[in-house]
Image: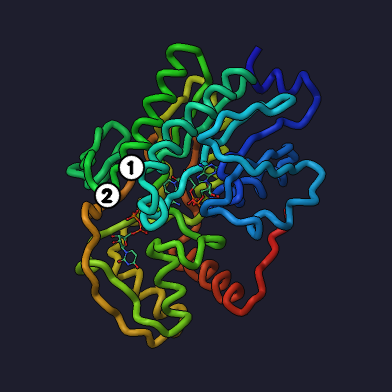
């Protein structure tokens, strides 16, 4: 019996665990799953997540929040059909604060989610990252590219941690038959990023709105490809619900590649800010270029991003402007 048939036969809404559900991407995913009628269990230790992100959901009859660190094993009563394994700080500023803790979150956290999936017969999706490609020597990056990661650098706790997490996913799949999905997520942005997140889009927007200098690291010629969070969340769900033969890894990102200085200029234009540009030192091992090949997602999931950078940036600017004015927008499903 397939998982979907089992869900249908049981005549109950699927129960979905979102580890990291109080974070930026996780909270949007919780919203989307509730909107689809699922029962959602959100697991988070609130390291970089915040209750504000899920506050409108706390009284929802199909929503439950459990404060828990995924590095510790967990037992949850009742059925669980799907596990989204998103719990991990994603911004270099946060994941480098406690690199050993980050590596443990990637390795022990993934093991604990896989063990739970095995016990519950649940399907599990791991949020992997374009960082598994490191500073890529192949451009753009298809899933077949094996990467160029410095294993002893300051980014390694995250990059190598996520690579180890992918290894664990495929070993649990091969050894124990756990149903897995591996999404390699490229830079994603949108409402609910943290003001002090350190990531480029949130930094530039907050700086522009405050009239502070826009901090460009290095020459600003390095590139990234930015995906709006709604597109990403749709892609994650499509991957999760794809046939069990599709394990990934599957790149999810927007192939529209832009230089960091161009992002700064866009943000200045859309915020009508007169903040000056300030060039600062480039962090060690900062990848020079990044752009996904999304042929797998297009072919296997029928997914491609829909939100243009301009529209996504404007929506994100509107969110930060409201937060800075003290009006936290409540997005109720
Ligand atoms: P985020 O920091 O906003 O969310 C991560 C969430 O996980 C937070 O709520 C945090 O409190 C929680 N968390 C961290 N460590 C935990 C632990 N040990 N136990 C329980 N909860 C823990 O980051 P995000 O941007 O929403 O990223 C979500 C996932 O997507 C992460 O796994 C990240 O690696 C992956 N990802 C994100 C991006 C991106 O551009 N945003 C790109 C690639 C991959
Ligand atoms: N960056 C920047 N100024 C900032 C924050 C980041 O120029 O205030 C640069 C950073 O050096 C990198 C790019 O923007 O080249 C993306 O950084 P981010 O931390 O958002 O994501 P990642 O490096 O993990 O892709």
Task: Quickly name the residue at label 1.
Answer: 157
Q: Position of residue 269 (x, y in %)?
A: 41, 80
- What residue appears at the point 69 percent right and 60 percent down from the top-left corner? 331
**Residue 317 shows up from this direction:** yes
> Hey, which residue is sitting farthest left in the picture?
137
The structure's colour scheme is rainbow
- Describe residue 103's horizontal placement relative to residue 281 as left or right: right
Q: Mark 2: is the Cβ under 8 angstroms from ligand 2?
A: no
130 or 36, nearer to the observer = 130
- At x 68%, y 38%, the residue is 41
Asked which secondary structure carries label 1, the reply is: helix
Residue 128 lies left or right of residue 232; in this view the side is left
Question: Could you say whether the residue bearing mark 2 is in a helix, strand or loop?
Answer: loop
Q: Quadrant of the N terminus?
A: top right
Q: Can residue 239 be seen in the rendering of this structure?
A: no
**Residue shown at 20%/69% (left/top)?**
219
- In screen coordinates, is 122 left or right of 127? right
Q: Which mark is residue 154?
A: 2
214 relative to 3, above or below: below
In front here: 36 or 124?
124
Circles 1 and 2, Cβ within 8 Å, touching? The answer is yes
């Amino acid at each position: 019996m397939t998982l979907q048939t089992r869900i249908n036969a049981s005549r109950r809404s699927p129960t979905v665990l979102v580890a990291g559900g109080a974070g930026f991407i996780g909270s949007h995913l919780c919203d989307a799953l509730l909107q689809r009628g699922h029962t959602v269990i959100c697991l988070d230790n609130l390291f970089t997540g915040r209750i504000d992100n899920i506050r409108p959901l706390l009284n929802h009859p199909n929503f439950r929040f459990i404060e828990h660190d995924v590095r510790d094993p967990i037992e949850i009563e009742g059925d669980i059909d799907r596990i989204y394994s998103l719990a991990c700080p994603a911004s270099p500023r946060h994941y480098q604060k406690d690199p050993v803790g980050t590596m443990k979150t990637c390795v022990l956290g993934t093991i604990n989610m896989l063990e739970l999936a095995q016990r519950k017969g649940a399907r599990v999706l791991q949020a992997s990252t374009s960082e598994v490609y490191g500073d890529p020597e192949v451009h753009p990056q298809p899933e077949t590219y094996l990467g160029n990661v410095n294993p002893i650098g300051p980014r390694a706790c995250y990059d190598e941690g996520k690579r180890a997490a992918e290894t664990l996913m495929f070993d649990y799949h091969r050894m124990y038959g756990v149903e897995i999905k591996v999404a390699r997520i490229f830079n994603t942005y949108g409402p609910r990023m943290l003001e002090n997140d350190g990531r480029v889009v949130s930094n530039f927007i907050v700086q522009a709105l405050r009239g502070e200098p826009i901090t460009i690291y290095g020459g600003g010629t390095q590139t990234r490809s930015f995906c709006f969070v709604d597109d990403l969340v749709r892609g994650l769900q499509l991957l999760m619900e794809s046939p069990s033969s599709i394990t990934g890894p599957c790149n999810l990102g927007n192939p529209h590649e832009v230089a960091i200085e161009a992002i700064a200029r866009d943000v200045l234009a859309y915020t009508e800010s007169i903040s000056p540009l300030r060039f600062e030192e480039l962090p060690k091992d900062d990848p020079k270029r990044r752009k996904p090949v999304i042929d797998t997602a297009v072919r296997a999931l029928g997914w491609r991003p829909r939100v243009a950078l301009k529209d996504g940036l404007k929506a994100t600017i509107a969110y930060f402007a409201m937060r800075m004015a003290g009006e936290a927008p409540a997005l109720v499903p």
